[in-house]
Amino acid sequence: MSSFSDVRSIANKVFADNGGNPLDFVNLLQKLLSLTVLKPGEIIDHDLNPKKGLGIFGSRLGQTALRLNNDFYLKFFMYFRYGRNDPLTIIRSSFQYQIDDGRSFTDRFVFRCDYDVNPQDEEHPIAHLQINGLLNEQITQKKLEDIRFPLYRPSIESLLILLIDGFGLKSNDATGEWRKILLHSEDCFRMYQAKKLVKFSPK
């Protein structure tokens, strides 16, 4: 099975009517990251609480960040709600591209995208982007003003494309299908979101 067929099969399972099995979601994220920018051997961590219908997955859950193939790091997590009769819903997420493997608040991050359905700080919008303007290191061949950041609530697929197109990371995918794979997975996610809004919105 090709990489594209493999990811398409997993994405179709993940974005079933109720979001499928959370472990399928973890498997999909691992595939997308491994095919594109992860250093070989790096593994996504996860923790599920079926009784409460809550889960989290990400980069070793509060410890070090995931090492990328350019020897920079990705710190990310997603908190989500799930259940037999409830759609799998991301309620909080954070993606941070950083130079070192420090914890969440390292001052050597390049950019960070955060999303929180119920932000506790009124000064922070639900979805927001932060860029570290104090870094002196050479982080990309492009000028920062030439990099196009995705807006609103970026998907992990759009952020992986940003790392490759904007920050010059090389894709691990030898077939050259990485962009097709990411765009298909993102389309599945967008369609799932749209169906969820229609199905679970008040009548």
Image (spheres, grey):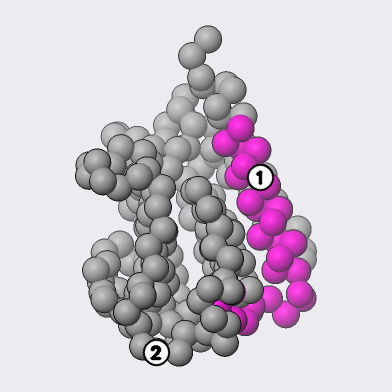
Q: Which amino acid does label 2 sit on?
A: Glu
Mark number, residue 139: none
On the picture, is 46 further left or further right than 52?
right
| Local secondary structure at mark 2 | loop
Q: Give the range drawn in magenta.
A: 166-194
Q: Name the residue under label 2.
A: 137
| Local secondary structure at mark 1 | helix
Of discs 1 and 2, which sits in the foreground?
2
Q: Which mark is first along the chain, 2 or 1?
A: 2
Which residue is more in the foreground, 151 or 16? Answer: 151
Q: How many labels does the image show?
A: 2
Q: What residue type is labelled 1?
A: Cys
Going 40% across and 74% down the picture, which residue do you hit?
A: 110
Q: Give the image location of residue 149, x and y in percent.
A: 54, 63
On the picture, is 172 further left or further right than 64?
right
Going 45% across and 75% down the picture, which residue do you hit?
A: 42
Residue 189 lies in magenta, yes or no?
yes
Q: Estimate the spatial distance between the alpha carbons at disc 1 and disc 2, rounded to whole Å.
A: 37 Å
Mark number, residue 188: 1
Q: Give the image location of residue 175, x and y in percent.
A: 77, 76
Q: Give the image location of residue 95, x and y in percent.
A: 41, 62
Going 58% across and 74% down the picture, which residue do you hit?
A: 146
